[in-house]
Image (cartoon, rainbow, N blue to C red):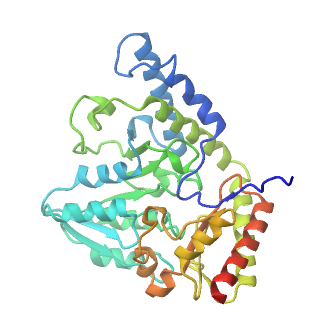
């Protein structure tokens, strides 16, 4: 009997598997080390110590102070905390047109409370140009929110330059770095941002845990009201096992980023990109002229519906995404791709392949063959 060919996972921008060392770090906090980190007895003190160790590990990944890191229930909460924590009626908020829905929908909710919101366009490569931000600034601008790297295209924004522009106008800058952290070096001092969101499950740690880095000296209104957890920024008993896993994942990411791992992933992505373009006529890489995350490929195939292609690929053992995983099943085209100037048809023919640290050359070659065959079948119907 032939061995079953293992499936290929190329949707790491949606979520990543938990590393064995991350799981090992978490396991004791579900069993013998189950204490509440707010308790003063030995069980609580051990949990508190583990939580603070994780805080240091996350801070070290960002070149930040541990006291500036607040743990949350995930990236969406971190984005919401940044926006709702700073803005009140009469303030002006600027967001880019290519933000994740966690920012765009939060902005829309704030707009209903009296916050003025401007949505800044990007160019054809998905980049927010500095002059576009400058044109949108007003004396009432309190906050600018521009993501560091796009979850669909991998396009990296000039956050440091945008932060300098915002600061000159007296505004703060928040960056959603959820896709960037763990894939590329992120230094909050170099970026000159004021707030930064990140999430554990994008860096081989558990789902349901995130963090918001807040520059020392900034005060946020809490989203949740209750106890004095997380320096009164986020009430509620901390998810100690998840946070411990987050810390272990951050430490592993920091170590991986110091190796040639990112370069190897980038070479595999580039090889995949070249092979698909060479073997599939009418294929176009979205954001190809921009700096992109080394693991991410957003590509469209003329005449093929992405939702059909994703299903066809899955049936042949390849997991990819039709744009953002958060939009899976949606019939509307990606707002990111349409903001880049793609037509509805072009946006709906785009898929995202995002490689993991563990992706191999053999998997890339097999994935190429699967995609080529699937596109040919769909076009021949």
Q: Residue furthest front?
A: 1
Find residue 295 and report its horizontal and vertical position in percent: 63, 62
Whether residue 91 is visible, yes or no, is yes
Find residue 340 and report its image quarter: bottom left
Q: Nearer the viewer, residue 118 or 310?
A: 310
Residue at the image point whose x is 56% and y is 48% from the top = 203
Q: Residue furthest top?
A: 41
Say if 182 sits above or below 294 in the image.
above
Residue at the image point whose x is 70% and y is 57% from the top = 7
Q: Nearer the viewer, residue 32 or 304?
A: 304
Find residue 87 and report its image quarter: bottom left
Say if 109 sits above or below 60 in the image.
below
Asked if residue 31 lies left or right of residue 353, the reply is left
Whether residue 171 is visible, yes or no, is no
Residue at the image point whose x is 23% and y is 69% from the top = 117
Q: Which residue lies furthest to the right in this view?
A: 1
Find residue 132 and report its horizontal and vertical position in percent: 35, 78
Residue at the image point whose x is 53% and y is 35% from the top = 245
Asked if residue 230 lies left or right of residue 317, the reply is left
Find residue 247 and report its horizontal and vertical position in percent: 53, 36
């Amino acid at each position: 009997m032939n061995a079953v060919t293992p499936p290929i996972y190329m949707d790491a921008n949606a979520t990543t598997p938990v590393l064995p060392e991350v799981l090992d770090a978490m396991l004791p906090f579900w069993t013998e080390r189950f204490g509440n980190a707010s308790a003063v007895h030995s069980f609580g003190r051990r949990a508190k110590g583990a939580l603070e160790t994780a805080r240091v590990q996350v801070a070290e990944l960002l070149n930040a102070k541990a006291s500036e890191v607040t743990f949350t229930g995930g990236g969406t909460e971190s984005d919401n905390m940044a926006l709702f924590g700073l803005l009140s009626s009469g303030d002006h908020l600027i967001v880019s047109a290519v933000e994740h829905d966690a920012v765009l929908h939060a902005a829309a909710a704030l707009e209903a409370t009296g916050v003025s919101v401007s949505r800044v366009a990007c160019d054809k490569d998905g980049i927010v140009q500095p002059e576009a931000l400058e044109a949108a600034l007003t004396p009432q601008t309190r906050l600018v929110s521009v993501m560091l790297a796009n979850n669909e295209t991998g396009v990296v924004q000039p956050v440091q330059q945008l932060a300098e522009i915002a600061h000159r106008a007296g505004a703060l800058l928040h960056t959603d770095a959820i896709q960037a952290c763990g894939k590329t070096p992120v230094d909050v001092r170099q970026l000159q941002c004021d707030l930064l969101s990140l999430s554990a499950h994008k860096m081989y740690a558990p789902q349901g845990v995130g963090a918001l880095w807040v520059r020392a000296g900034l005060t946020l209104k809490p989203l949740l009201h209750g106890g004095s957890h997380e320096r009164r920024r986020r009430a509620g008993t901390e998810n100690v096992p998840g946070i411990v896993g987050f810390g272990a994942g951050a430490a592993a990411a920091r170590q991986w980023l110091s190796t040639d791992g990112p370069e190897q992933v980038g070479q595999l992505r580039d090889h995949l990109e070249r092979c698909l373009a060479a073997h599939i006529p009418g294929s176009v890489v979205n954001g190809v002229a921009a700096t992109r995350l080394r693991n991410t490929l957003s590509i469209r195939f003329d005449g093929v519906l992405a939702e059909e292609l994703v299903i066809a690929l899955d049936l042949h053992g390849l997991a990819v995404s039709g744009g953002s995983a958060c939009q899976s099943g949606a019939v509307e085209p990606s707002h990111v791709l349409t903001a880049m100037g793609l037509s509805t048809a072009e946006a709906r023919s785009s898929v995202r392949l995002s490689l993991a640290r563990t992706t191999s050359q053999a998997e890339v070659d097999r994935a190429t063959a699967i995609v080529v065959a699937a596109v040919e079948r769909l076009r021949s119907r």
